[in-house]
Image (cartoon, grey):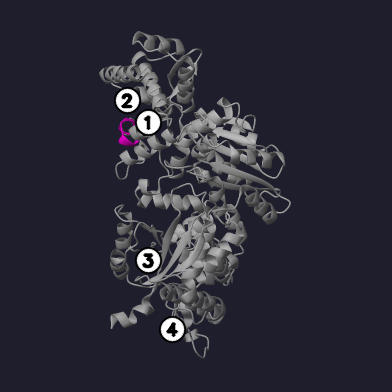
């Protein structure tokens, strides 16, 4: 029974009944006061006060006539009572010259009923005075010439103020106006929908999405919408989009909400089928410049009004693989989903709850991407969405820092040829991809990135551009020129060491073609590699790459850029280091090598316990000793395909580790002390190769480790043993 009646006791119904009752009460008090229980008494008293006083006046006249006739006050005043058809007064004389009038107890008399008034004739005159009796007649109904204030029958009365029988009505109207004005202000300020938005407009950004249509109507009715949105720094177009999403019902609700949210973060949204979930599922494809490692995610919009337990049960049974699943739930203060909220807060799964308030903030706030990042960081393992790319070239613009001067030299000039040389994981690929991103959409230049990884340049390019594998380089360039008529063509060729090595062994046939295409102005090239490229372009005077283009050596990252790389991606996820000294320690230990900074930051994230948001000294210490860092520092012993050159590189490194520094002279003396004839040219190339690989750095005539962490990898006893072994082998083979 109660359940069937409960809709009639809802907050809205009760509020409507109260408003109607108050309105009826005020209206009846103003227009039909005789029917209002509060104003009825005053109204009836005002209507009857005239006849009552007329009756008393007749008594006074009759008593004056009796006094004149008897030459004194009559003992029985009833003998001289005036003829009144329907008397409302019972008049007595407690003493001479005094009349006591008791008004009848009739409900029709209102406030006058049952009251008393006393009048007194001054001896020798025709002047009467009056005062309220017991119970007293209300002061507002005393005549103008009636005086009051005497405490007994013999005390002289004090003058009474002029009475206004209708003053109560004016007071009522005035107080109703005041109450209405105060009520209006309180209604606006304390209204659960718009009150908070008026006092603190920024609160609108965190209002549950379902409330927005009602708030929109209320603010429009008050003509406060534009002013409130302006104070909250909300664009009208964003507000209208959010209101439309909230108003969408039925089959249009889920697509409208998913597409609107996706648009705010520049994601592509499309339906995803074959999901056993109670609602609709969508797939979002994020742009490559997203500052976290998240290329796509799934978005689930539960059926409106569905039971929370049903949603949770289906979610636990669903197989999402490694995809992050955003749940656009109805969770809010109005419709709490505590079970689903707790499920999303469990970092063991890949489910992220986007509650109703967050949906509003996402749609109307100025930083939709920050809302997404905050939710991801709060409900997922940080390592799942790590903003640090530690393998391959940096493809996301948000993860690329520094190299501003190198980029400016390439982008802000007329097209030219460049040779990008440097060791592995120093940022060559990242630089080329950054150039490609900045040239994308250029009105006069078209840029293509090609990664070789073997010696077959022409077949690789042909397949990438949809041509037959046997298509020669000239035909590939002709095809691209025809496809982009009127635009200058720039080819970024990465991982080209094997190609250069093959060309060196086969007479530079294809390199000669590249040079010819460039000199004809048909195409420009940016070639990236390590030692083989350096040897071909710098050391080999017969190479077509000699003076082919400007050599750009990739080394350590600018210190300011290292600091940005270490702190900015963390800041976007509301993480950070405990103090600036930790950042400096990380940068110094990495030797400002970009990928090593990223790896150290990634390992610091790995070291964070669930719920920790600040990287402390213990986390950094753990990161510096991690296996990932050791793996990143490895590989320096195989910088060349020539085993003899690699052995000489290892001797140089071991000697540097043993002595703290080295030089060409010191190395020559070391070899001589072991009976090895020093090849100065080979030693110079080894030092150049290690310097190019960012293993060593040169200061004056001495060479030291470019990365302090690398020095820490060597134990003194092990270094001495390894050095003597390499020298012994070199002595035998030499």
Q: CA distance from mark 4 to mark 2?
A: 111 Å
User: Disc 3 on helix, strand or loop?
Assistant: loop
Give the residue furthest to the right.
486
N-term-proximal mark, 4 vs 3: 4
Residue for badge 3: 335
Closer to the eye: label 1 or 3: 1
Residue position marked by numbered label 2 in the rendering = 713
Q: Which mark is residue 106?
A: 4
Residue furthest front as drawn: 506
The answer to which image quadrant residue 223 occupies is bottom right
Q: Position of residue 700 (x, y in %)?
A: 51, 13
Q: Which residues are magenta?
A: 621-628
**Quadrant assignment for the N terminus:** bottom left
CB-based contact (under 8 Å), mark 2 and mark 3: no
Label 2: few (<14), some (14–19) or many (≥20) C-alpha neighbours in 10 Å: some
Q: Residues within 10 Å of mark 4 (few under 14, many from 20)?
A: few
Marks 1 and 3, Cα distance to the nearest angstrom? 53 Å
Calculate the distance from the C-alpha at mark 1 to the C-alpha at mark 2.
Answer: 9 Å
Observer-nearest of 196 and 550? 550
Q: Horizontally, is 76 left or right of 729 in the view?
A: right
Mark 1 = which residue?
Answer: 633
């Amino acid at each position: 029974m109660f359940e069937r009646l409960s809709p009639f006791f809802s907050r809205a119904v009760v509020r409507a009944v109260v408003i109607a009752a108050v309105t009826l009460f005020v209206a009846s008090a103003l227009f039909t006061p005789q029917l209002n229980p509060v104003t009825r008494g005053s109204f009836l008293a005002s209507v009857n006060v005239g006849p009552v006083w007329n009756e008393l006046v007749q008594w006074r006249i009759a008593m004056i006539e009796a006094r004149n006739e008897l030459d004194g006050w009559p003992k029985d005043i009833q003998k001289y009572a005036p003829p009144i058809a329907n008397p409302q007064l019972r008049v007595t004389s407690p003493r001479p010259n005094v009349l006591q009038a008791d008004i009848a107890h009739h409900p029709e008399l209102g406030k006058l009923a049952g009251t008393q008034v006393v009048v007194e004739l001054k001896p020798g005159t025709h002047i009467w005075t009056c005062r309220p009796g017991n119970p007293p007649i209300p002061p507002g109904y005393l005549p103008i010439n009636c005086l009051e204030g005497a405490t007994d029958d013999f005390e002289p009365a004090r003058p009474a103020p002029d009475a206004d029988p209708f003053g109560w009505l004016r007071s009522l109207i005035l107080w109703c106006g005041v109450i209405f004005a105060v009520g209006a202000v309180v209604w606006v300020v304390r209204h659960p929908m718009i009150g908070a938005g008026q006092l603190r407009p920024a609160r609108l950004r965190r209002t549950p999405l379902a409330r927005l249509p009602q708030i929109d109507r209320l603010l429009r009715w008050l003509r406060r919408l534009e002013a409130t949105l302006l104070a909250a720094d909300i664009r009208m177009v964003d507000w209208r989009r959010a209101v439309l999403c909230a108003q969408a019902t039925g089959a249009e609700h889920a697509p409208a909400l998913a597409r609107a949210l996706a648009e705010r973060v520049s994601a592509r949204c499309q339906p995803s089928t074959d999901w056993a979930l109670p609602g609709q599922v969508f797939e979002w494809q994020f742009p490559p410049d997203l500052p976290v490692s998240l290329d796509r995610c799934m978005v689930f919009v539960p059926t409106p009004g569905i039971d929370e337990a049903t949603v949770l049960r289906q979610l636990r049974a669903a197989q999402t693989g490694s995809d992050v699943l955003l749940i656009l739930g109805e969770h809010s203060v109005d419709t709490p989903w505590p079970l689903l909220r707790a499920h999303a807060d469990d970092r063991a799964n890949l489910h992220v709850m986007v509650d109703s308030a967050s949906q509003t903030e996402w749609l109307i706030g100025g930083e939709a991407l920050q809302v997404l990042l905050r939710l991801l960081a709060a409900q997922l393992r940080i390592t799942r969405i790590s903003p640090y790319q530690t393998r391959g070239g940096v493809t996301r613009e948000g993860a690329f820092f520094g190299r501003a001067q190198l980029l400016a030299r390439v982008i802000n000039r007329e097209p030219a040829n460049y040779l990008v040389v440097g060791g592995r994981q120093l940022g060559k690929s990242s630089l080329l991809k950054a150039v490609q991103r900045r040239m994308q959409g250029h009105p006069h230049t078209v840029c293509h990135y090609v990664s070789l990884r073997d010696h077959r340049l022409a077949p690789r390019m042909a397949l990438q551009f949809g041509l037959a594998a046997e298509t020669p380089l000239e035909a590939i360039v002709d095809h691209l020129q025809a496809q982009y008529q009127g635009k200058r063509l720039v080819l970024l060729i990465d991982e080209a060491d094997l190609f250069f090595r093959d060309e060196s062994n086969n007479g530079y046939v294809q390199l000669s073609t590249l040079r010819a295409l460039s000199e004809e102005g048909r195409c420009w090239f940016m070639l990236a590699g390590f030692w083989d490229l350096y040897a071909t372009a710098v050391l080999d005077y017969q190479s077509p790459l000699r003076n082919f283009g400007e050599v750009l050596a990739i080394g350590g990252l600018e210190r300011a850029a290292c600091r940005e790389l270490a702190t900015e991606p963390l800041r976007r996820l509301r993480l950070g280091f405990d103090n600036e000294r930790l950042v400096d320690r990380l940068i110094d230990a990495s030797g400002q090598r970009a990928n090593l900074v990223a790896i150290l930051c990634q390992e610091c994230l790995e070291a964070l316990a669930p719920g920790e948001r600040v990287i402390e000294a213990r986390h950094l210490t753990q990161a510096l000793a991690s296996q990932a860092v050791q793996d990143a520092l490895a590989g320096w012993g195989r910088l060349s395909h020539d085993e003899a050159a690699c052995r000489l590189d290892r001797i140089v490194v071991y000697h540097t580790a043993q002595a703290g520094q080295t030089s060409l002279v010191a190395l020559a003396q070391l070899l001589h002390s072991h009976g090895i004839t020093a090849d100065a040219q080979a030693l110079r190339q080894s030092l150049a190769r290690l310097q190019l690989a960012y293993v060593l750095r040169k200061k004056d005539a001495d060479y030291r480790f470019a990365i302090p962490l690398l020095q820490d990898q060597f134990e003194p006893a092990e270094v001495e043993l390894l050095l003597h072994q390499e020298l012994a082998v070199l002595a035998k083979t030499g």
